[in-house]
Image (tube, coloured by chain):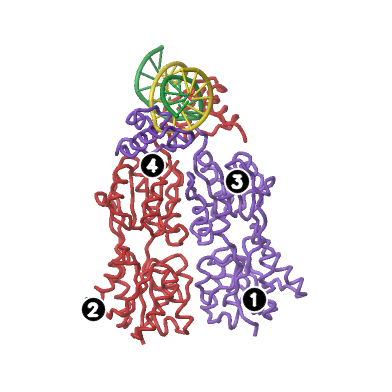
Chain colours: A red, B purple, C yellow, D green
Amino acid sequence: MKKKVTLFDVAQAAGVSPSTVSRIVAGTARVSEKKRKQVEEAIAKLKYQPNLVAKGLVQGRTLSLGVLTQDIASPFYGAALLGIQEALRGTDYIPVFTDGHWQPEDEAQAIQRLMGRIDGLIIMGGHLEGDSLSAIAESMPIISIGRTIPGFEHHCVLIDNYQGAKNIVHYLFELGHRRIAHISGPADHADALERLKGYHDAHKEFGIEVDERLIVQGDFQEASGSLAIATLLETRANFTAIFASNDQMAYGARLALYRRGIRVPEEISLVGFDDTRTSEYMMPPLTTVRQPMYELGLLAAQSLLTLLDGEDVTLEKITPQLVIRESASRAR
Amino acid sequence: MKKKVTLFDVAQAAGVSPSTVSRIVAGTARVSEKKRKQVEEAIAKLKYQPNLVAKGLVQGRTLSLGVLTQDIASPFYGAALLGIQEALRGTDYIPVFTDGHWQPEDEAQAIQRLMGRIDGLIIMGGHLEGDSLSAIAESMPIISIGRTIPGFEHHCVLIDNYQGAKNIVHYLFELGHRRIAHISGPADHADALERLKGYHDAHKEFGIEVDERLIVQGDFQEASGSLAIATLLETRANFTAIFASNDQMAYGARLALYRRGIRVPEEISLVGFDDTRTSEYMMPPLTTVRQPMYELGLLAAQSLLTLLDGEDVTLEKITPQLVIRESASRAR
DNA sequence: TTGTATGCGTTATCAA
DNA sequence: TTGATAACGCATACAA
């Protein structure tokens, strides 16, 4: 282990005061050319690396930004992380990623661990109580994607799950489907409920009655999609298309259909929601509703930087776009 | 913004000295029951949260651990991240994830950004020069997965890519395949080269000559797998099986085959390497070689904690296991 | 423009 | 067992 070189050492080596070195490193004030050169040489010679912890203590900031997802290993959130990294490139901030495993307790715990080590927070999905979030928002800048923070609505990018779901169900109607099954998400998940409502209302607008037997609940994971197919097939309520509330469940559904020798889209059309990274490589490539996670991550991080800069921002709701690939075709 | 409560405030409220409070919070020394109670009440009342940055400064550590992957958004590395999180649960350390995008420059830059903000580093994959790594290893504890750090071999978990590749090619031979195409990884990637060598040596052991036209280079991303199929088909060198150097390229290959109406495994068998999360949900479920990334992440983090504790560890090479699913069958 | 002195919140050292 | 006091490395108000 090497011994650490401090700003003080540099000052001594350059024959100036510590504050001068500090100013040069931080670039906060004008300094004479001569001293600057001396100091820069000393820095190079001693290989001085500023101690960010000390800097953080005195400035009351950590130069870290927290990012709470629900599943850090999912390609869906992964795309957002890339966007965040991109936005932070060139700044002094680093992102600290963590996840809540779709569980309010884990979520609260994850945030708790971050407290005191971050200057701001980006939060995506999840269902921690609004009150807790608002409390956090009081203490540091927060940007959220996909959920409302009471009192800070203008710092939230909301995704119009309702409209997105309605659009893709409409699309299935246009293809001639009339009996569309739905694999919904968790009943306590706002996004899932909005998508479910979109499914219902699309039917209403088309004057088609919903057969409740065609709605099966999943948990947003692949396995639950497979299970849902088993359930649907058991009820023997026939259907020509399936709308899964997210792509991951669509993967599971796809596999279950394959196992039973049911062809997609020839026999049954299948659509999802999210446009996760691998959906493009599904067989057939999955028709879905695209949530632009990379761009959202980028936007969130940029906005957070703006907030940290003292300026305010106002974010708006976005409507996800239909991505038509090959997993849905005309009804027979 | 709320004002922050310091240890000093707690001390005042409890009518004791700051050091006593510190001891109680850290649990470093015996304290009388009475004062403990007073302090704990004060902490609860004031909602005191220790400032980890200050703690870090005085102790000369950051309580953060760096984790360098190659692609933070890939489910492959994602699994390792989950393992790392699990290992760190209950400790004061938080993981800081970053990635190198498979590029030595980005990798160096990523590490540079972490320097001074972490107490230890876990590094997975990538191809930064061994020397640079050794230099870093001099300054802080490092655990690596899948790559050697000269001088610190016992802190590296190596994966026997060579043996893994040989095993799966053997498996294909046993199924009767004799002409096996290989979609290799980047030529400057150690893992890719080892797998390629395994492919070659498996042939040698079986006394089968390798047709060089059957080897096409990819870059470990999905798209390159699709491209490789196009190339392979163009050369008109026939083959009955494909061994992709990783699962992601296998996905791309699978899609390209589907596009051309070539059935898997009936007409062509396809196998990969890694056992990425979604491989189980491919169609058909992908036969591959499993790298237990979750467990490896867990092990790496635990080992790093041990190192930080002052003890040493010695890690050993592991051989990845063959996972037989349905994408490979007997040769026609 | 430059230097001095002080404080950030905590732990560690040393007496008491 | 407890308390005063000195670091930790840096930034900054203030003085020069």
| Disc 3 and disc 4 on one polypeptide chain | no
Q: CA distance from mark 4 to mark 2?
A: 49 Å
Residue under label 2, please give it.
A206
Q: Are marks 3 and 4 in contact (CB under 8 Å)?
A: no
| Disc 4 and disc 1 on one polypeptide chain | no
Q: Position of residue B270 (x, y in %)?
A: 60, 75
What's the residue type where badge 1 is placed? Answer: Thr
Chain holding disc 3: B
| Quadrant occupied by the C terminus of chain A | bottom left
What's the residue type where badge 4 is placed? Answer: Asp
Chain holding disc 1: B
Where is residue B269, by image quadrant? Answer: bottom right
Return the mark for residue B142.
3
Where is residue A271, by image quadrant? Answer: bottom left
| Dot 3: element | strand
What's the residue type where badge 3 is placed? Answer: Ile
Return the mark for residue B108.
none
Q: CA distance from mark 1 to mark 2?
A: 52 Å
* Of pointers 1 and 3, the one earlier in the residue sequence: 3
Label 3 or label 4, whichever lies nearer to me, is: 3
Q: Position of residue B185 (x, y in %)?
A: 62, 63
Label 1 or label 3, whichever lies nearer to me, is: 3
| Dot 1: element | helix
Q: CA distance from mark 3 to mark 4?
A: 27 Å
Chain holding disc 4: A
Residue under label 1, please give it.
B235
